[in-house]
Structures are given as structure tokens and as C-alpha cells.
Amino acid sequence: MHRRLLCLTSLLPCARPSSITSVFLSSPPPIALYVPSQPTASFSSSTSLASATSPKTASAAAAAMPAMKTLSLIGSDEVSLEIKDPVDPTALEQARAIVSELRPSGPSGPVEAGKLLEVAKRLGDVPSDHAGSYTVSKEECKAAFDGLSDVDRASLIRIHDRVKAFANAQRRSVVDVEVDIPGGKAGHTVSPCAAAGCYAPGGRYPLPSSVIMTAVTARAAGCGRVVLASPRPAPITMAAAHISGADVVLRVGGAQAVAAMAYGIDGGGGGEAIPPCDVIVGPGNKWVTAAKSIVNGRCGIDMLAGPSEVLVIADKTANAEVVAADLIAQAEHDTAARAILLSDDSALIERVDGAVTEQLASLPEPNRGTAAEAFKNSFAVLCDSVDQAIEISDHIAPEHLEIQTENAAEVANKCANYGGLFVGEGAAEVLGDYGAGPNHTLPTGGTGKYTGGLSVFNFLRIRTWMRVDDAEKSQGMVDDSIVMARLEGLEGHARAAEARSLTKEPAYKSKA
């Protein structure tokens, strides 16, 4: 039987300009249950996720279905994808103003050290009475590391080591290449950019894990200089900077941090001069995202990310308490976070909903309030089958995709679009957050359809080269180039090729 459930609690779409792509309810959902009188159509990328359904038996079905407590239950055809600009227009305007203020000498100049500290104080990155520098010294970072408890220090070291091992393996996976071409050789070289800028949020909670994920990956790629920026850095953040090998730690955040890393700091007034970075990576708020969009092109960036997401595909074999815990873990990130459950078992959805409600009640503040607000943006879908759940998931392309089903590996292999994949009940997304090895900086809002998460490849340049040693053996390439250039109407190209020909006189030498 083809089954669809429409929203049982009122939930309106949440407009979040910082999200690249938002899963939303295509219309304000009626408080009713719709069961199709005919089988729903199969999903394709050119249609909605399921065909329209008949509401003829809605009232009877709704009466038989218990109301959900926390999760909103919607039908598969209610899931749609809205493409949005990843940059909040208001945040972009504010970020532009900040960047301009930091560079009074004009668009070609670096950030002025005095202005950076002034803005950092005004925006709360450092206390208003802060008399020190905009940087944290290496000695302070080492002292923070030494000051950790034995348990915390050992955990930080182990997380660092696992992330480093994985990043090193990634680096080894791409190598220089050389092949034969007519008359010579061609190839590519793999080399790191010189300077990496890494951002670690310092808002609601300190995120030392983001320090490790960004700085350690840059080091594994081979970057010679690593600059870390984090507003109001907590001791654990500074300790993570120490073990990750950051060369410079900026105690600033937001657009001002991105500008400082992109354009460099002049070091005026006794401050430390910092050269521009070649690439800037790491998660951040809407001002960080806006500023990354401004500097993109001046330097490289990893991605323009929106709020965090988790999607769990689960069947009747899943542990409802574990699924609920994973949904809550993602929801507590931010009020705009999104937790999604897809299942072919209505009883499992009901059990998860009950477990979410129960576990939320015991969560401390401010986590509970944040997660509860995030669940207003979240939902569950009762699917006809696990295969339909996979189709919906591929349409959404979630940042984190968990598979908690029978034959989880088999199901996982069918999934095409996601940022990070977590296979089986034991592979909790939180283990990925805290250093199983793969990076936790992942594409959000559907961008997993065309890109992946942060890796050593963000810091590497693959540059091609060619060399001709035997002009006679290269003549076939020369002749082909002459022909193609004239087919494209590029006479100058043709003549440049003719200058290498051993049989044809270049046109520029012929008499008119």
C-alpha cells in the first residue's frame, strides 16, 4: 500500500537567507492526514517527490493516527527544494561596510591593525578595555594546552592524531603525473598553497574541533603558514591551535577576521604584520559567509555554508532512542538547524517522536531551547519503502546522512548525494564531529550534489605542464593545432603554431 502522511502539527516554512538551499513545506500544511486513493507516482528529478493525492479518506485516516509531540510529520510530496542565495543581503551589506572600514587606504591596501582592533572591540571579539594585541601568542596557546586536565589533553591529542592520519592519507592519494606526448612529455604537479586561513566559530560554544579540522588539514596538505581566527578564543580553542600547529591566532571573528586573512594586516601601531592568505576555510555565521563571498577570487574559499543538517534513513530495525539522540545532537547546533527522519515504518516514527520529546525534556539550557526551536524547522516523512527514502534523501542532499537500517551498507551504497555518510547505528554523526578522521566541515543546503567537504584538496594546486624535446616528432600536434585554430577563427593562434612547423611557412612571413 502506498502511504503518505501530511503534517499533523502546524508548521510554516522558515525563511533563512543564510541557507544555500532549504528544504521547506511547499504550502502551509493542513492539519489532516491524506491517504492516496491511487498509488503515488515514482519520483524523478523533474517532478515532485510524489504525485498529488486524493483527500477522500483523509478524515478517517487522521482519526486513526496519533498526534505527533515534537516531530512534524509530512508527506513525501510536501518536501520540496528552494534554491536560495547563500548570502544574507543584510549581512552582505554590513560585511562590505566592515571591510571598507578596515581598509581606509582603499581596495588595494591591507587591513590596518589599529582599525582591526577598534572594530574587534566594538563588535565584542575582545573586551572593550583590552589593551593587548589582536593576536594570541604561541606561548599563551601552549600554556592553555599545558593547563588542560590529563583527560582533556589526552582526548585532544587522540582527536588530532586521527584527523591528521586521515588527512595524510588523502594527501598521499594524489600524486604528480607524467605521460608521453608526441615529441615530449606532459604532466601535472601537486603542490600546496603557501598560506591557509582557518576560521573557528567562537559564539554559542567554543569549537576546538573546528580548529583541528581546518588547521591540521592545511598542515597535512603542506601549507607553510597557517593563520587561525576565532573570536573570544576559549582556553580549549587556544590549546587546539597549539597542537594543530597554527602559526598565528587572531582573536577576532566575523567579517573582520575574514578580511584580515584575505588582505593581510599592515602591523601598524606595534601590531603583528600578517601577509594575506591564499585560501580561507572553516564554518561561521552569516557575516563570515558574506565576507567569504566578498573575498572569493582575491583568495580561495572552501564553501558558502548554511545552517547544519542531519537526515536519518531508518527502518523498523532502528533503535528509536539512538535516532532521537542523533536528531537532537544536530538540532542543538543552532535554532536554524534542521533534523530530518525518513522511514518506511510508522511505528518507528512514533517511537522516535516520543524519544525526542523525552530526551529534550532532560537536556540542559540553553541547549534545550535551541534544539526545540530547531525542531520547528524539522520533520519526518513516512515513505513507501527504503528506496523511496533514498530518492528523497538524494533530492535533499543533506550535510550529514545517517543510515540506520537492516543491511545498512547496502542501503548506503545506493545513496548518491550527501556531505558526509554515516553507515550503521554505531557510526554516529557526532563521532565525525569529534575526530573519527574525516573532516566535519561539510556542504549544506543541497550543495552535496556537486561538491564535497573540506579536505587537503582545498589547499592543493594541481598544475599542468608540457615539454617538447623532439620537434620532428611533435609535427602531428603542430598540424592539428593549425587546423583547429583556423576553424575557431583565431589566426594568431594558427600562426603561432606555424612558427613551430618544419614543413609550413608561417603566414606572417608570406608576401601579400
Image: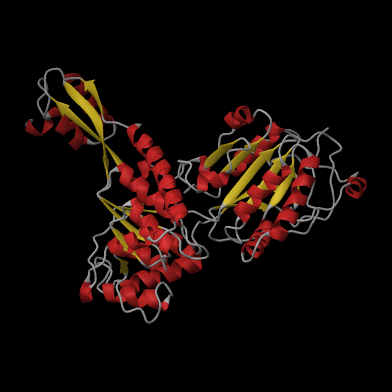
Q: What percent of the width, then of the height, locates residue 500?
A: 12, 27
- Which one is in front, 500 or 208? 208
Q: What percent of the width, then of the height, locates residue 175?
A: 29, 31
Tell me if 236 is positioned left or right of 407 in this view. Answer: left
Tell me if 118 is positioned left or right of 378 in this view. Answer: left
Quadrant of the drawing holding the C terminus: top left
Residue at 39% across, 74% down: 126
Q: Residue furthest top?
A: 473
Tell me if 148 is positioned left or right of 272 in this view. Answer: right
Res. 12 in view: no
Q: What percent of the width, then of the height, locates residue 43?
A: 68, 35
- Which one is in front, 192 or 492? 192
- Which one is in front, 95 or 154? 154
Tell me if 56 is positioned left or right of 159 in this view. Answer: right
Residue at 75% across, 53% down: 72
Q: Is residue 176 above or below residue 226?
A: above
Residue at 36% across, 48% down: 216
What count of labels does the image hold?
A: 0
Q: Is residue 273 above or below residue 54?
A: below
Q: Residue furthest bottom?
A: 129
Q: Is residue 56 above or below residue 477?
A: below
Say how the picture is coloured: secondary structure
Res. 378 in view: yes
* Quarter occupied by residue 494: top left
Quadrant of the drawing holding the N terminus: top right
